[in-house]
């Protein structure tokens, strides 16, 4: 059983299993009884130590305590519908992290800490069973693969959605004279205002998702750099004579290199989405401004009309005529 490389894990990951992985890794130590919360194992990468310790605590508290990304619909359109329909839909690692005030470390830091620790067990021959460690590592890699698949698909769909809204809303602003005349009709103006409120909600929830996803991306990239530096420091000599470990470590190393490229791709697509959201907000603000101007024109027109009526019937009392 070889480790899957990025993009090969197509089935939906059972994230509830991920919370027990770090405990399973500890059990693979030759002397697991020495592992306690008071004396946690030393992680080979100092930058991962605190995140690793927090993952131990979460794992011992149970699956519901682990701040991993929940399994959502595989279909990007279904995920986007849920995100737009629910103000608190946990579509990202960061959203789950935000819901746990006591958690100090981003879930991707904890996940990469666990992967590095698993490689450490293989490198130092500390595991009771290499195959069990490899199985655990495989689940971790599947989770990261799913993160990229979900995030990149979600960015693509969100960008498509926002771009279509921009094209639709930009059209009336290209014919402002006609649009302003139509806004003088109260019913049309009210329909525009109601539509803008819905778009404002789309903007708010998409912007929040984008911010969370970019936080995930930055943390994942930073943690991946630490992991890759650790893998580089191990070299390949320790796998000589063991084709199985050589293949496993080679796959993990290749994945870590690919992750950095994919995190860059996430950043690029996220930045494109951010620019489109800015464009959409600009168009929305212009429409709101023109609807407001039309409303004021209508109000002034009604006031002038009533003043004129008052003046016609009681010229000397026009100044005190009811203007409501």
Image (spheres, grey):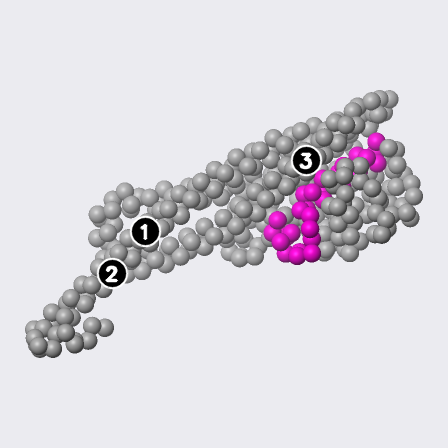
Q: How many marks?
A: 3
User: Which comes before the other along the chain, label 2 or label 3?
Assistant: 3
Q: Residue at x 81, y 35 (%)?
A: 120
Q: Position of residue 155 (x, y in %)?
A: 52, 41
Task: Give the SS element for disc 2.
Answer: helix
Q: Residue 287 got which mark?
A: 1
Q: Is residue 243 left or right of residue 96?
A: right
Position of residue 257 relative to residue 305, above or below, is above
Task: Give the SS element for disc 1.
Answer: helix
Q: Nearer the viewer, mark 1 or mark 3?
A: 3
Q: Is residue 69 left or right of residue 134?
A: left
Residue holding disc 2: 296
Q: Residue 43 got which mark?
A: none
Quarter of the image for residue 161 reads top left
> Dot 2, crowdedness within 10 Å: few (<14), some or many (≥20)?
few
Position of residue 194 relative to residue 168, above or below, is below
Q: Position of residue 248 (x, y in %)?
A: 78, 29
Give the position of the C terminus as an image quadrant: bottom left
User: Which comes before the other along the chain, label 1 or label 2?
Assistant: 1
Residue holding disc 3: 224
Magenta segment boundaries in residue numbering? 94-123
Q: Residue at x 14, y 70 (%)?
A: 307
Q: In this orientation, does residue 289 appear? A: yes
Q: Is residue 320 left or right of residue 242?
A: left
Q: Is residue 19 magenta?
A: no
Quarter of the image for residue 201 reads bottom left
Look at the numbered discs 2 and 3 and tell me whether their residues touch, using CB distance below 8 Å.
no
Q: In this orientation, does residue 145 appear? A: no
């Amino acid at each position: 059983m070889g480790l899957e490389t990025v993009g090969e894990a197509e089935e939906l990951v059972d994230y509830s299993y991920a919370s027990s992985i770090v405990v399973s890794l500890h059990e693979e130590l030759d002397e697991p009884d020495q592992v306690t919360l008071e004396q946690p194992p030393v992680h080979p990468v100092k930058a991962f130590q605190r995140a690793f310790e927090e993952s131990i605590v979460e794992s011992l508290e149970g699956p519901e305590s682990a701040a991993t990304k929940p399994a959502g619909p595989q279909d990007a359109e279904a995920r986007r519908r849920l995100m737009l329909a629910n103000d608190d839909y946990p579509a990202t690692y960061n959203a789950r992290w935000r819901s746990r005030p006591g958690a100090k470390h981003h879930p991707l830091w904890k996940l990469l800490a666990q992967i590095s620790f698993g490689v450490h067990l293989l490198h130092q021959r500390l595991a009771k069973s290499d195959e069990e460690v490899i199985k655990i590592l495989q689940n971790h890699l599947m989770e990261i693969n799913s993160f990229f698949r979900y995030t990149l698909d979600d960015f693509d769909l969100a960008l498509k959605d926002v771009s279509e809204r921009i094209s639709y809303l930009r059209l009336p602003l290209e014919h402002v004279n006609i649009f302003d005349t139509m806004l003088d009709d109260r019913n049309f103006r009210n329909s525009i205002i109601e539509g803008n409120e819905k778009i404002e909600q789309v903007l708010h929830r998409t912007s929040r998702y984008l911010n969370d996803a970019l936080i995930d991306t930055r943390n994942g990239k930073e943690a991946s750099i630490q992991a890759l530096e650790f893998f580089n420091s191990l070299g390949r000599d320790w796998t000589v004579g063991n084709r199985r470990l050589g293949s496993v470590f080679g796959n993990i190393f290749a994945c870590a290199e690919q992750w950095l490229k994919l995190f860059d791709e996430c950043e690029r697509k996220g930045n494109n989405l951010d620019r489109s959201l800015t464009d959409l907000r600009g168009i929305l603000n212009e429409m709101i401004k023109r609807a407001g101007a039309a409303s004021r024109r209508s109000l002034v027109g009604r006031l002038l009309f009533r003043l004129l009526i008052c003046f016609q019937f009681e010229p000397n009392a026009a100044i005190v005529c009811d203007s409501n």
